[in-house]
Image (cartoon, coloured by chain):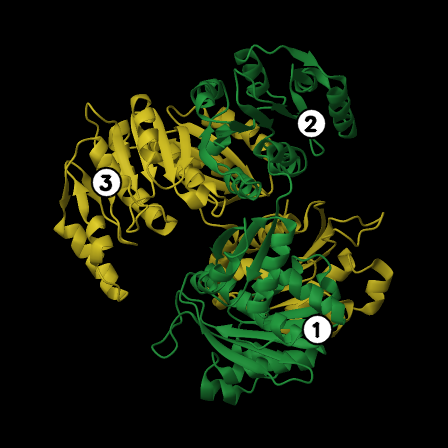
Chain colours: A yellow, B green
Amino acid sequence: MRLDLINTGTELVLGRTVNTHLSYLGEKLFLAGLRIQRQICIPDGDVIGDVLNERMPHADIIIVTGGLGPTSDDITRELISEMLGLELHFDDAVADNVKSYYALRNRPFGEGGKRQSMVPEGAIVLPNNHGTAPGLYLPKTKKNPHLFLLPGPPRELYPMFEDETIPYLRKIVGQTDVESKEWKFCGMGESELAEHLEPLLSKIPELEIGYCAKTMEVHLRCVGSDNSLIQANKIVRNKYPHHVVSDDLKLIEEVVVELLREKGQWVTFAESCTGGFLAHRLTNVSGASAVLAEAHVTYANEVKTRLLDVDPKSIEAHGVVSAKVVTQMAEGALKVSGADHALAITGIAGPTGGSDEKPVGTVYLGLASKGAETHAEKCFYPIDRESFKWRTTQRAFDLLRRRLLGYPFE
Amino acid sequence: MRLDLINTGTELVLGRTVNTHLSYLGEKLFLAGLRIQRQICIPDGDVIGDVLNERMPHADIIIVTGGLGPTSDDITRELISEMLGLELHFDDAVADNVKSYYALRNRPFGEGGKRQSMVPEGAIVLPNNHGTAPGLYLPKTKKNPHLFLLPGPPRELYPMFEDETIPYLRKIVGQTDVESKEWKFCGMGESELAEHLEPLLSKIPELEIGYCAKTMEVHLRCVGSDNSLIQANKIVRNKYPHHVVSDDLKLIEEVVVELLREKGQWVTFAESCTGGFLAHRLTNVSGASAVLAEAHVTYANEVKTRLLDVDPKSIEAHGVVSAKVVTQMAEGALKVSGADHALAITGIAGPTGGSDEKPVGTVYLGLASKGAETHAEKCFYPIDRESFKWRTTQRAFDLLRRRLLGYPFE
């Protein structure tokens, strides 16, 4: 199946908005057994007509995003109808949806609402539950390949794509019983994973395997029948019982919040060089307030002493970036907060502040827990400041995840 | 000038990597007086040949990214040379660069290094200071438009584009003395800005004006001669003395760190619903440790009382999301830390926790400063959790910026 993706939007080619449609749709299409052979991005306006004329002979499926809205440069619907000789008719059901959306926001239906309620003959309406303009599916004819016209804004496009478009695509591909599963791994590299899992997974018939190395995480994605995914899951879990963070797309911070909630336990943080990023990531999870009462950024040495009871002599003897100090930070945070677990971080994010002995990128992580020995370890992430923060907090969450599950830290 | 951008990379169409080249290059090209008429993204491999054949008759300039590296699917250089009948020769200067890059990393030069050292006849080499494969510029001939072949990885592409490619593009466009300036505004909308500034700026001859509405920020970009930009700056500064955050691309958190450093002052934070995001943003700025000694996430009421001395009776009487409590949080944080300024935030990020009186999105911001009256205000950002955090911290930084500059808060 040859599939083209066409993204329209002047803001995209002017560089004002990052085009995330390609990565989003590319991934979802892959899971539906499709690959994009070509993606084209063009400004709003009638160039969409030229592009469609060029591409229709070379594609079985064309997905167009954008140009369905109410403004004067939104002309995808009208232009395609004209090109294919399809009459547009006013659709009452669509109009009702647009009207009620506008009514809620005290906006008039007007000419823009009317235009968005027009549907080309033969088109299947894909309801828009997060905006006004519906999507349109024009099934294949002698004149045209399968054409999907979808809205541009991600909050409208993404649910419409997953709920309304994928089922039609699966029918076109003839792949109606295929499922997918994705495992997230922490603490190992892509090549290590591939080397050990590939020989085992490749024995499962008709299972498509893909890897994706993210920063401090590897994702393994399998596409196949329900049964083959159950087999794959057994192999993965058996081979790597401690490295799998999730198999349902959950982020590691979501997994940690869930584990803490299940146990009714609390966590606290004492961050130096990550400057609140650990707390930020955890509190991005809805419901974080059930597991986190307080967290602290203790940049200055004096604050580490005043707030966390770190011994100034330890700082003098070992340096503030040391196993000794991170241990005291974690244990101090545990004590002052009364939490069940405390993560502490102290290091040199850079670009300045490094030395020969402790270069930029050196960081110590500490995890203190009630009734357990405090764990402290040294990591080294010599990289830009924000990536350093990401890697360090990723490892910190994995330490906590492993402690909550009783797994070893390695 | 008709310009096409072609991005090659299988990882892009599979959705594993977000294609940020379009937004990056689109913006830089706009500043050089060029607009992308079409961007095309294709997998690695020989489809690049088809696309170039199709597009060469329709473009004056084509920029290709990716496919210059050492692996077997990197075939852009060879394929284009063959298409245009250009012989490839081994370039010693390029080879030296590749060799020294590999030597530093203990990697052999080998076949891959040799391939990257080949240059088509007539091509101008664009040095790669952050990797191995150089860029190649093939000036316009009867057979081909201006062709720029650039590496795919952003850390190699971006500096090469700015330092080595833009000067050639400016020559092609004949726009050698054009400069640009971008102002960031906080606290006003795009339409308000356009309405008031456009009539004034449009009187400056040959000045190109563009707006870009970001979340809680509007960017105004002008392109023109040095002199016209000086005039534009006068108009902007005169009309909006308090709203301009920067005119040199600095982020608001960078501006705040700079202002604090200049004054030798310290700030601290007491965050509830933003959960450390304020501290995270500030500590993304290198040198933040000179202005921030400590910051606190005080989620639980008990912690607000213990750490910041918030009166439990105030919480009971006014609710924890109130002007009274945020004022006590800010003043408590100021006192406990000894800082010069303290920002406090308490609100309901959602999706749960709202009430009729205080719906999700309600947030209070407080700013206490030594020797000044504490400012408290209510904002309302009913949106998803992460956007809520962004908007709230954006406003918080703007409050601090205004106080540091002696500007009014409105």
**Secondary structure beneath label 2:** loop
Q: Position of residue B260 (x, y in %)?
A: 71, 69
Residue at 84%, 58% in the rendered image:
A318
Q: Position of residue A84 (x, y in %)?
A: 20, 30
Q: Amino acid at mark 1?
A: Leu
Where residue B157 sits, quadrant-wise, is: top right
Tag 2 residue: B132
Q: Nearer the viewer, residue A294 or B379?
A: B379
Tag 3 residue: A78
Mark 3 → mark 1, Cα distance in angstroms: 65 Å
Residue A307 marker: 1
Q: Is residue A210 left or right of residue B120?
A: left
Chain letter of disc 3 in the image: A
10 Å crowding of disc 3: few (<14), some (14-19), many (20+): some
Which quadrant is the N terminus of chain A positioned in?
top left
Q: Are marks 2 and 1 on the same chain?
A: no
Q: Are marks 2 and 3 on the same chain?
A: no
